[in-house]
Image: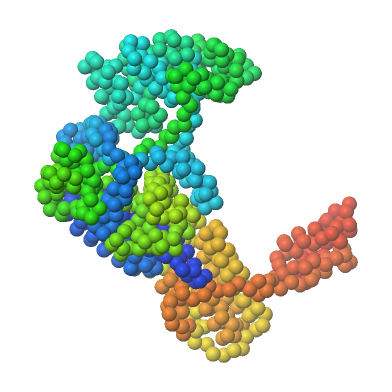
Amino acid sequence: MLPYPSGKLHMGHVRNYSIGDALARHMWMRGYNVLHPMGWDSFGLPAENAAIKEGRHPRDWTLSNIAHMKAQMQRLGFAFDWSREVTTCEPEYYRWNQWFFLKMFERGLAYRKEALLNWCPECATVLANEQVVNGCCWRHETTPVEQRAMRQWFLKTTAYAAELLDDMRQLENGWPERVLAMQRNWIGRSEGAEIDFKLDDSSQAIRVFTTRIDTIYGATCLILAPAHPLVETLVTKEDERLKVKEMIDSTARQDPGKLEKVGLFTGRYALHPFHGGKVPIWIGNFVLMGYGTGAIMAVPAHDARDFEFCRAYGIPVVPVIRPKDGALADAATMTEPFEEYGIVENSGPWSRLPSETARARMAAFAAEHGFGTASITYRIKDWGISRQRYWGTPIPMIHCESCGIVPVAEKDLPVLLPLDVEITGTGGSPLEHVESFIHATCPKCGGAGRRESDTMDTFVDSSWYFYRYCDPRNDSGPFASKEIARWFPIDQYIGGVEHAILHLIYSRFWTKMMRDIGIVSNNEPAERLFTQGMVIKDGAKMSKSLGNVVSPDEMVAKFGADSARMYSLFAAPPDRDLDWQEDGVSGINRFLARVYRFVTRQAGRTENAGKAADERQARRRLHQTIQKISADFDSRWHFNTSIASLMELVNDLHKLEAGLSAVCAREVCEAITLLLAPFAPYTAQELWIELGHTGPAFREPWPAFDPELAKEDLIELPVQVNGKLRGHIQVALGTAKEELERLALANEKVQPFLAGKQIGKVIAIVDRLVNIVVK
């Protein structure tokens, strides 16, 4: 995943890119064509904040950060193809954001509607969620943030909700189950029914969505979201309207998980569609306008959230479902709801039916009588992409008094982001005050118009950037489809699990949209996803406020790039959190120095006298290590154990060094150098040259594993019982005493002579014999 150019790489970046770089180098050595590019997710709010705090233009701040971070990446030796570099804040990139927007607008996938936004009354501007701190504006710690309704642009992600969910089956073998579970929950498919409750004094109706229509006879009130369109009609007193507004504002300022449920009775009633009784209408701060219909029927006897709310406000609790083998609960003594399926009671003609049967029949009855219908709804919302910010992609639309909202012609793209802008953080979007930008000609009638002043959410930039890597200089389209067909879907995508439900869903949506407009043929952007663990220090995530940030520059200066990279791969399996220890980096540094000394010692040797047993053992250990590291790359990516096996090999070779001929020593040293190349490229390259070679080490073939050479030498040892030969065992040379004892006692020819006897002791002599003394 491409980084945001915040200024400097952190150790999380180093770990992420070291994992990918090791894989890329290994696959090159295995003979694959490898596309290993890099780019910059370079639009976004931090650049505007820097402009306010430091007086620097967002573009200057961003490009200087890119230059610094690119130099850091190059110093760390990451083998990125910089000829394919993508920078999302450049017009040659964001032009295609605008092109995609127009294509979606043509198909009804981009549209405008009213939505609630965070608003700071003191700054008189919209705030991003990140700018709301403890319910207040980030610039004014005592100014509470409000919610204000404004017209916004949306992308219709809900049009792909079913496909996004169903196509996860294609990802089950390549994506972490944790990520798929998070996406399933975020998309949130619910199967149920939509039911109309008519107001008792008008022809209007409130439509609710429920997954449990079998409980509808237990509905004792309706609860509307504070932002529901009917609230303005139902609530007419000024003091109550102020309470509703405070519900909306306070909900935006609080963590939804910690929200205290607050309700307001409207004084109005609806008619129950099944039995005709009056049902009071409430407003509740915990009901979301974006899920279902923005209204719920509260069934406190059978839903925990409803039970808590209704008990708090004295609303009746009416049980209508009993356990299949139990009695109906007494409402007066209930301390918690019964939420399972069971047997329906007190529900007219549907009484005594199982819940599952009642659900189907009651939904059919509602449809037949015109007050409901079976329905599937999703938790996922359409993607609001409007940002009242400067540093983002301009939305290519023009507002004309005569023609309405008109798209910019494709030939006039890109709509350039002006550079002559003053960023104050107040007074709405900075683009509204740039006359040369805001005034435009209507493409339809030629009259005066105003450009859209909102810019796009930066997740638009990161939803398709990896496709641009395949054809980064194309100026006639976002890319050539034939280039995408060559490389996509991505074989391996690597990044943090925190992106599971935003970037990774948006990029899947974008791929499906591009497929439908005919420019790609793949359904999913990436076949395999790997989510690496965090880098922590002293048991906590690295943070400036905690003072535990480790600078990659300092590590490189002190220990070298290879040591920093290799430690990030060695200290923990890549999917686990890594607790940074500088002593560990120092240890890796010492190991690399030891490898360097060993290889350079052998490089100049010419004599060929050696011991056959030592050479056989050296080749055996080498090929066992090749097998181990190759298997780690092919399956679990436990690079920590790969590096540990290299360390063990080098230890063994030191012991055998005196018995190796020059030919054998060179063979082993060349293989070690190539095994090291994915993890420590600088060291490997220097050793490759020391060994008399030219060209990049990571373009050499990966060392081949020979199973015959990896086999242990086996010897046959006699097993005696009280000094008499009773059997034999085959073991590798040097097998430890404990293992000899275990194998001897388990030998099927020996066991009859042990039956019914007490073992006194076992005498095991390595590489000689085993004698079992029994009584």
Residue pictured at 16% horizontal, 38% vertical: 402
Left of 515 or right of it: where is 710? Answer: right
Front residue of this view, candidates 714 and 362: 362
Residue drawn at (31%, 15%) of the image? 266
In this view, which residue lies farthest toward the bottom?
607
Q: Is residue 214 visible?
A: no
Figure check: 246 above or below 642: above
The quarter in which the N terminus is drawn is: bottom left
- Residue extending furthest toward the left: 435
**Nearer-the-camera pick, 744 or 432:** 432
Residue furthest front in the image: 445
Q: Depth check: 587 or 267 in front? A: 267
Q: State whether residue 138 is above or below residue 17.
A: above
Q: Is residue 748 left or right of residue 159?
A: right
Q: Please name the residue shown 28% across and 57% down the image.
A: 93
Left or right: 320 as drawn, with respect to 466: right
Q: Which image quarter: residue 616?
A: bottom right
Residue 513: x and y, percent? Answer: 39, 48
User: Where does the image place residue 312, in percent across and percent down from the top left?
Assistant: 40, 16
Dividing the picture into quarters, in which one does residue 414 lie? Answer: bottom left
Residue 534 percent location from the top left of the image: 42, 51
**Residue 629 placed where, x, y %?**
55, 66
**Residue at the (34%, 14%) spot, across then down:** 203
